Image (tube, rainbow, N blue to C red):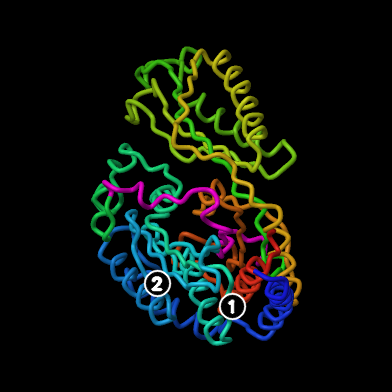
Amino acid sequence: MNSTAKCSILLGFFFLLPTLAVAADTLRADADRMEQRIVALSAFGANTDGGVDRIAFSKADLAGRAYITKLMKAAGLSVRLDTAGNIIGRREGSQPDLPVIMFGSHIDSVPGGGNFDGDVGVIGAIEVIELLKAGNIRTRHPLEVVSFTDEEGGLTGSRAMIGEVDDRTLSVMSHSGMTIGEGIRAVGGDPDRLDLAERKPGDIKAFIELHIEQGAILDEEGIDIGVVEGIVGIRWWDVTIEGSANHAGTTPMNRRRDAMISAAEFILAVNQVATSMPGAQVATVGKIRAEPGAPNVIPGKVVLSLEIRDLSAAKMQAVFDDVRAASDRIADARSTPIRYEELNVASPPAPTNEAMRRIIATSADDLGLSFRLMPSGAGHDAQDMAQIAPTGMIFVPSAKGISHSPKEFTSAKDMAHGASVLLRTVLEIDGGALE
């Protein structure tokens, strides 16, 4: 290549950045279009409470997936299913050998879920493609819009994309009544060839997920955009408290080894430990079972759950250590041994990429939108993608912090703000902001 050609390419690249910036300034997501599509998607699996039962692999999920595929194709994307059943719509760039910029979320719901969790991220990603098409903007990098399979059932699609779905996972029974392996096959994937769905580090330039906050911070503080610092790690234990079952009518209070009393003290101790430490850590006892479980028998055994979440693995361990110390005191005082079994389904903290945070924050600011840094207390596909690519998350407000409920709501204006930030973020990354 001669020096004149090299000069032309360099000049073209440097002129590209302001051109894309101007384009991003003039393009804004269409709030009405996004709302109409959210409403249309909500029909698949609609329940009488106003929410959806669009659980992964169900007939409602299949119908919703068909609708999303139709939208992707109408936006000009070439659409394919990978072997994990992830729906991927691709828009070629001017330099097709560059790694892809990927963005999206999921459309499956929990039973009795709402119409915005995951859906906003997929509809918002398609909106970005619509805006690029309307603005006649061709990016350098190829773009891929993804709707991940079975996020609510265990991040199945994104875990397959990073090569972490094994035979044990495939055998897990999903809410659909099928195993995850059977469900993947039902939506058109191939659980026997999941290696073909894997992406390696370097394949993806960046991954961005637009999502509702699922908490009340943005809504209560009147802030437009949450720039996610990271997705909290989660650790789970089964905790067993051993007492002595005996007749509830004939055993004096001072001669009891009541596992339920120790369980009550344990639950209060978990709350005290989590609230006494500085920071945003949380600890929860969400499940409890007494044995033998009769009203006239002193519980001889109680099995309960313990969940701890935080952005820091060290903080999670510190919370557990303090809970363990408190439970040792309870066990000694009540003569009720307490033992722990940590479950291996937990997930480590997943910080987002620092440069991606800056790009998202700058994009929001340039659009005149308020923003704040914040953690995500819920799990997302982004936590898997962060293992193989620079990853960022954009939050938009959830009214009253309600999620996983038919009362879940995000306004059309807020959805559009998020999609506009997503558009600008994609263009900034394409223009070299992540180099």
At horizontal 37% and vertical 55% (from top left) the residue drawn is 150
What is the three-letter code of the residue carrying label 1? Ala
What is the three-letter code of the residue carrying label 2? Gly
At horizontal 41% and vertical 65% (from top left) the residue drawn is 88
Checking the image for residue 416, the label placed there is 1
Identify the image quadrant of residue 21. bottom right
Residue carrying label 2: 50
> In the image, residue 307 lies at what x, y percent?
52, 37
Q: Which residues are magenta?
A: 191-219
> In the image, residue 315 lies at what x, y percent?
67, 34
At horizontal 29% and vertical 70% (from top left) the residue drawn is 63
Question: Relative to 204, does residue 135 appear above or below in the rendering?
Answer: below
Q: Kindly report which numbered mark, 1 or 2, lies closer to the viewer in this rendering.
A: 1
Q: Residues within 10 Å of mark 2 (few under 14, many from 20)?
A: some
Quarter of the N terminus within the rendering:
bottom right
Q: In this view of the protein, which residue sits in the foreground, 10 or 308?
A: 10
Using residue 67 as the reference point, say whether residue 257 is left or right of it: right
Q: Earlier in the sequence, mark 1 or mark 2?
A: 2
At horizontal 45% and vertical 64% (from top left) the residue drawn is 146
Q: Residues within 10 Å of mark 1 (few under 14, many from 20)?
A: many
